[in-house]
Image (cartoon, rainbow, N blue to C red):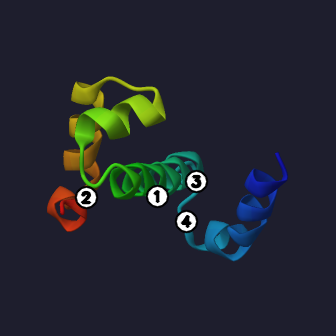
Amino acid sequence: MNIALNSIDKFDDYFLKVTKGEIYYTVIRHVEKILIEKALKRSSGNQIAAAKMLGINRNTLRTKIKKLGIKVEKWKL
């Protein structure tokens, strides 16, 4: 998928600033947060719909929202 490769190329400079051994988890957290925020935006903050969109369980989504510090109210109408 070219989109993923293009996005990873943009991380090159960022990789130099991340502590060795933490690059994978840092990038995953960053990308995961963006994906969850996009799903919440498309679902107008509906966590059940966002979880279905992402293919994960609602409880998993809630855990990730809390862990990543995402503000759900931002997308509610």
* Crowding at mark 4 (Cα within 10 Å: few <14, some 14-19, many 20+): few
**Dot 2: what SS?**
loop
Name the residue nearer the viewer: 15 or 51.
51
Q: Are marks 2 and 4 in contact (CB under 8 Å)?
A: no
Q: Residue furthest right?
A: 2
The quarter of the picture where the N terminus appears is top right
Pointer 3 residue:
23
* Crowding at mark 3 (Cα within 10 Å: few <14, some 14-19, many 20+): some
Pointer 4 residue:
18
Image coordinates for residue 51, horizontal then vertical, percent:
35, 33
- The three-letter amino acid code for the residue at tag 2 is Ile
- Closer to viewer: mark 2 or mark 4: 2
Labels 2 and 4: the sequence-earlier one:
4
- Alpha-carbon distance for marks 2 and 4? 22 Å
- Alpha-carbon distance for marks 1 and 3? 17 Å
* Residue 70 image label: 2
Labels 2 and 3: the sequence-earlier one:
3
Image coordinates for residue 6, horizontal then vertical, percent:
79, 63
- Alpha-carbon distance for marks 4 and 1? 19 Å
Name the residue nearer the viewer: 68 or 44.
44
Reply above or below: 21 against 9: above
Q: Are marks 4 and 3 in contact (CB under 8 Å)?
A: yes
* Left or right: 58 as drawn, with respect to 32: left
Labels 1 and 2: the sequence-earlier one:
1
- The three-letter amino acid code for the residue at tag 1 is Ile
Pointer 1 residue:
34
**Dot 1: what SS?**
helix
